[in-house]
Image (tube, helix red, strand yellow):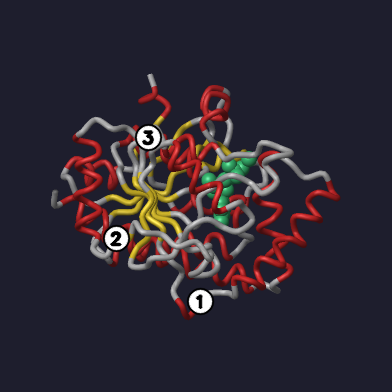
Amino acid sequence: MIKDKMKIHPEVARALKEGRPVVALESTIISHGMPYPENIETARALEHIIRENGGIPATIAIIEGVAKIGLTPEEMAFMAVSKDILKVSRRDLPEVLGLGKNGATTVAGTMILADLAGIRVFATGGIGGVHRGYDKVLDISQDLEELSRTNVAVVCAGVKSILDIRSTLEYLETKSVPVYVYQSREFPAFYSRKSGIPWDFEVADLADLATILKTKWDLGFDGGVVLANPIPAASELDFEMMNDLIIEALKKAGDLGIEGKAMTPFLLDEVKSLTRGDSLKANIALVANNALVATQLAVALAKK
Ligand code: PSU
Ligand code: MN
């Protein structure tokens, strides 16, 4: 049934059949996470990085109710410019697929479709998590639930401090999701390499992570793994400064009554204005670095 609603790009289908390394990319970052034209430039650059390093990219989105696994250049441009695109996690999939709507997939939505297509590695910017102030409004991203059930490794730059990083990590532990940091012993905070949270689960060599993934899935333990890949030092922003700006953005969100799925895009946009675009530059740099590491992980996994 889902097969009628899913179209795998021929290049991606061939690579999957031959067991070559495929890396999934999300589309919420294109439609809701970055402004035009940086969004399309970044989306294209990510695919280029994956190819240069021996992988096949598969950007995932839903167009007129069909889940596309790998986009044509026209489809990618559509996702970058159209205003009429829903943000799609697990709960939105039945509506968007069923009623023929357009949807940009979040980390959760992309994991589901990647898994159905047989793609095991996915690169993004940051995962969703437990929002600050969850004791008043219980805002916890569906990404965390998806990580506990769907077999895809997610390479990200950690968790943005628009979220409660510590609570997000505790939630992932409760849900038995393995969380590793690549070549560091501190959990990264998206725009910065540090967060003040020490982390013992370091992966120094991606071949080890490929072995861990294979072992997890061989054991029949469903769910994903998070690989937090710190932003390159040359592109990072100061943690304390970002924290202050985020507190300002959160206050504005509260004053304007922003809530639900609009919260993350609102905060991203506010932070971009407050940093006069520096946060967008950092975002572009970290997601490129994640595409590279995800490709290296997919190459290592293809050898297992
Ligand atoms: N974090 C970012 N940039 C993003 C997102 C998160 O730094 O664009 C997007 C991702 O698609 C993620 C989603 O899956 O926001 C989480 O949204 P929510 O908090 O509404 O679950
Ligand atoms: Mn939410």
- The relative height of residue 288 versus residue 254 in the rendered view (above or below) is below
Answer with mark 1 or mark 3, whichever residue precedes in sequence. 3
Report if the beta carbon of the residue with label 2 is closer than 8 angstroms to ligand 1.
no
Q: Is mark 1 within 8 Å of ligand 1?
A: no
Q: Which residue is mark 2?
A: 203
The N terminus is located in which quarter?
top left
User: Mark 2 and mark 1 in contact (Cβ < 8 Å)?
Assistant: no
Residue 55: image location, x then y, percent: 27, 57
Task: Give the mark toward the camera: 1 or 2.
Answer: 2
Within 10 Å of disc 1 (Cα), the crowding (few <14, some 14-19, many 20+) is: some
Evaluate if marks 1 and 3 touch, with contact meaning CB atoms under 8 Å apart: no
Query: Which residue in the structure is indicated by mark 3?
Result: 150
Residue corresponding to mark 1: 235
Q: Amino acid at mark 3?
A: Thr
Q: Residue at x 69, y 59 (%)?
A: 269
Separation (CA) of disc 3 from disc 2: 21 Å
Residue at the limit of the structure toward the bottom, as seen here: 234
Position of residue 121 measured from the top left corner of the image (x, y, whole percent): 32, 48
**Label 1 or label 2, whichever comes before in sequence order:** 2
Of 203 and 155, nearer the camera is 203
Residue at image x 51%, y 65%?
41
* Kind of residue at badge 2: Val
Q: Residues within 10 Å of mark 2 (few under 14, many from 20)?
A: some
Q: Nearer the viewer, residue 199 or 239?
A: 199
Residue 87 in view (yes/no):
yes
Q: Observer-nearest residue: 216 or 281? A: 216
Kind of residue at badge 1: Ser
Residue at disc 2, secondary structure: strand
Vertical order, 1 against 128 (above or below): above
Q: Dot 3 lies on which element?
A: loop
Q: Is residue 281 above or below residue 161?
A: below
